[in-house]
């Protein structure tokens, strides 16, 4: 009982996050409009790491953090390629991941879009000439959109998605 | 031997006895290793390199450490293709031996596991990329794999045993790796991991490049360990060339390393809470992480601190007004993390999920060389910053926290304490910030070799660098993840499959830092 009353008077656990990025809010709201019209309010993304160093994954994860919270704009990250509209592929594709990437691509239902995220995914980056690399993502599966950066920041990814949605709507 | 100048103690701790034994042949090697095992030594690293003077002659370098007797032993012998396995004495050696077998084609007699490691099935037979006779470039892989070359997992058989295969592509936004569980009911009876999906050929890529060109490669070893791995490379080069960075540069590096640790541990804590379905507890940690990444970008120019480290110093200075901004910011972080930590730890349902989950017993620490928060949560008192101080840690000693419980809860507590300790450490550096130059640009790098160790957020990161004719002859990276990954197979034993994500997150090891 005491614990119950203590809960009533204690400070709330939630906090107000200030200093949201105005750029991000702007592009996010634009993106929401596009998603509403093209994908009927929900865009499902599946992320596949094919040879990245985890920096791009960290930034993609940050999209769901309190500062960005992309679910407001209708973007969700899903657990399986079978639920996905868009594949986010990071890293120059290694020989060891090539087969898995093909399988993920085949598992995603059509129509589907592939976005190469980061310099390495787009053109191989510093790993271009390594024996262990098969090639950039476009050498394995068709790529619809490239987001450059080492790694791209969250706002760059939102901008990239916006361009992709505008392209898809046409 | 062309280039093995004796640099004395390989680490800057004069209290540690350092012995280097070069055996002309493998005779007597096994006896020495047995005596090291009996005295309680730890295998820090095992690496192989081709001799510059004669082709197809391989030097194997073993690095043992015994901190009870303050003793580091470097044992080296030469072989033309066959070596003696020590994996039964030091289980962690099995991974190194498989790595060397793949890279150089050296066969280890008496090893219990001879499966390929980083070369998966699609790589052709007799392909050894780290040999100098192979010139780096695209290769032809096989599409059809003969049945005898398929990877074989350990199989548990019996009534009610079934297998759960997870990966390489996981449900979350994480890196690829394969986990094969053998389960009875809900309880895990065995887990076998298979990694190296992210093998990008980092070590070969560095060969033939100038040491400062390799900084980019070191930063790409693992995304959120860019500062640790590049400082580690810088330390090795500076040891070879005898460069002493200024005190101010060392202090700036120290701030960078501690900020990186804070970022990494914040996301670990958030991840652990998310994985038990407690987002209200996780959000403050995630918010703090974003704030840290923004201030890192403001001070160091990049959200992951890429391009900040330079051989002999750092790329740019941070003015004192900006340092004051950081000081007040970091004080806020400490306070807010303390509040978030207290809120989390006061939730009985959370404790119920974390306590006694995923126990790593202290007896695994030495055989597997577990380091960092994972080791310290299982009774280890070791930390490179305190044991082999480098840079700023020579003047300031970090606070260390340790626990014997070895479960997810103790890892959560130690990681949270570490964040607050790092924040206090940064404040201490800023208070006593030395003045001076930040970069020593005029340096010649002579031929030579050196080891260097740095404590990253995940534990002990080790680098071996060998420079020959002005370019890198061999660059060996061994991140903490390489050895710490072994602990997960023990941690999940007798736990239930649904607890695997939180156990995995409590270790939060790097796949790319492991796969190279």
Image (cartoon, coloured by chain):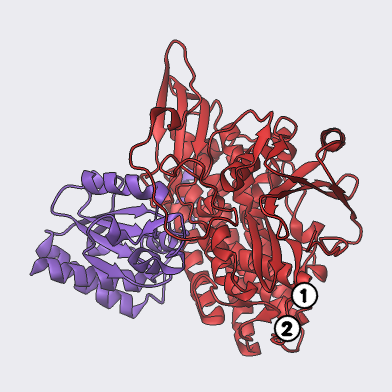
Which residue lies at the image location 20% right of the left edge and 54% below the top edge? A85
SS at badge 2: loop
Q: Is residue B167 left or right of residue B487?
A: left
Considering only vertical position in the picture, is B34 above or below B511? above
Give the quadrant of the C terminus of chain A.
Answer: bottom left
Residue ranking furthest to the front: B54
Query: Does the image show residue B287?
Result: yes
Q: Do callouts 2 and 1 mark residues in contact (Cβ within 8 Å)?
A: yes
**Badge number at residue B443:** 2
x and y, in percent, of residue B232 in the image: 68, 65
Look at the image and give the colour of chain A: purple
Total tally of numbered discs in the picture: 2
**Badge number at residue B241:** 1
Residue ranking furthest to the top: B159
Which residue lies at the image location 88% right of the left edge and 44% below the top edge? B68
**Front-most of residues B471 and B370:** B471
x and y, in percent, of residue B499 in the image: 47, 35
x and y, in percent, of residue B367 in the image: 72, 36
* Chain red in the figure, letter: B
Considering only vertical position in the picture, is B338 above or below B482? below
Image quadrant where residue A45 sits: bottom left
Which residue lies at the image location 77% right of the left edge and 75% below the top edge? B241
x and y, in percent, of residue B278 in the image: 44, 47
Considering only vertical position in the picture, is B300 above or below A51? below
Q: Of callouts 2 and 1, which one flags the residue occurring earlier in the amino acid sequence?
A: 1
Which residue lies at the image location 48% right of the left edge and 56% below the top edge? B200
**Front-most of residues B326 and A131:** A131
SS at badge 1: helix
């Amino acid at each position: 009982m005491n614990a119950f009353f203590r809960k009533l008077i204690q400070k709330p656990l939630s906090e107000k996050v200030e200093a949201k990025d105005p750029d991000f809010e702007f592009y996010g709201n634009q993106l929401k409009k596009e998603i509403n019209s093209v994908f009927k309010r929900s865009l499902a993304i599946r992320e596949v790491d094919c040879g990245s160093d985890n920096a791009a994954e960290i930034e993609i994860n940050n999209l769901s953090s309190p500062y960005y919270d992309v679910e407001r704009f209708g973007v969700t990250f899903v657990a399986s390629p079978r639920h996905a509209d868009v594949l986010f592929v990071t890293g120059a594709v290694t020989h060891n991941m090539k087969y898995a990437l093909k399988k993920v691509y085949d598992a995603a239902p059509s129509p589907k879009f592939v976005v190469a995220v980061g310099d390495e995914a787009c053109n191989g980056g510093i790993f271009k000439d390594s024996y262990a690399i098969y090639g950039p993502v476009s050498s394995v599966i068709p790529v619809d959109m490239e987001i450059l950066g080492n790694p791209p920041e969250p706002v760059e990814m939102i901008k990239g998605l916006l361009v992709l949605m505008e392209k898809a709507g046409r | 031997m062309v280039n093995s100048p004796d640099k004395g103690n390989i680490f800057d701790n004069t209290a540690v006895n350092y012995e280097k034994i070069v055996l002309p042949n493998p005779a007597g090697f096994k006896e020495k290793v047995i005596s090291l095992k009996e005295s309680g030594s730890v295998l820090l690293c095992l690496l192989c390199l081709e001799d510059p003077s004669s082709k197809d002659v391989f030097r194997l370098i073993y690095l043992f450490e015994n901190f009870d007797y303050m003793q580091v032993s470097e044992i080296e012998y030469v072989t033309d293709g066959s070596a003696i396995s020590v994996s039964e004495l030091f289980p962690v050696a099995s991974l190194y031996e498989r790595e060397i077998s793949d890279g150089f084609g050296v066969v280890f007699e008496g090893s219990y596991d001879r499966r390929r490691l980083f070369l998966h099935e699609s790589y052709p037979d007799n392909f050894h990329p780290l040999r100098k006779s192979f010139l780096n470039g695209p290769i032809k892989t096989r599409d059809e794999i003969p049945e005898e070359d398929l990877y074989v997992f350990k199989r548990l058989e019996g009534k009610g045993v079934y297998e759960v295969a997870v990966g390489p592509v996981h449900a979350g936004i994480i890196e690829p790796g394969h986990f094969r569980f053998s389960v009875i009911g809900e309880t895990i009876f065995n887990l076998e991991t298979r990694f190296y999906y992210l093998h990008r050929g980092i070590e070969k890529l560095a060969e033939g490049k100038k040491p400062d060109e390799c900084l980019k490669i070191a930063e790409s070893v693992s995304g959120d360990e860019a500062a640790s791995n590049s400082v580690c490379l810088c330390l090795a080069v500076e040891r070879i060339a005898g460069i002493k960075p200024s005190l101010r540069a060392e202090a700036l590096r120290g701030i960078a390393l501690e900020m990186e640790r804070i970022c990494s541990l914040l996301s670990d804590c958030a991840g652990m809470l998310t994985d038990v379905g407690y987002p209200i507890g996780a959000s403050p940690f995630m918010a703090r992480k974003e704030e840290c990444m923004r201030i890192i970008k403001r001070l160091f120019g990049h959200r992951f601190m890429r391009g900040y480290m330079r051989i002999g110093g750092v790329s740019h200075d941070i003015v004192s007004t900006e340092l004051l901004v950081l000081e007040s910011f970091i004080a806020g972080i400490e306070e807010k993390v303390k509040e978030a930590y207290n809120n989390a730890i006061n939730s009985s349902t959370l404790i119920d999920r974390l306590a006694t989950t995923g126990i790593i017993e202290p007896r695994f620490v030495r055989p597997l060389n577990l380091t960092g928060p994972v080791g310290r949560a299982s009774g280890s008192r070791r930390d490179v910053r305190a044991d082999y101080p480098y840079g700023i840690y020579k003047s300031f000693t970090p606070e260390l926290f340790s626990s014997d419980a070895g479960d997810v809860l103790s890892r959560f507590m130690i990681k949270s304490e570490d964040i607050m300790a790092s924040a206090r450490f940064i404040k201490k550096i800023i208070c006593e910030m030395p003045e001076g130059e930040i970069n020593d640009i005029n340096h010649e790098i002579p031929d030579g070799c050196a080891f260097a160790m740095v404590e990253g957020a995940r534990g002990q990161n080790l680098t071996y660098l060998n420079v020959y004719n002005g370019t890198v002859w061999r660059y060996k990276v061994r991140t903490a993840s390489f050895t710490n990954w072994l602990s997960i197979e023990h941690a999940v034993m007798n736990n239930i499959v649904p607890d695997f994500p939180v156990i995995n997150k409590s270790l939060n090891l790097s796949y790319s830092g492991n796969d190279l």
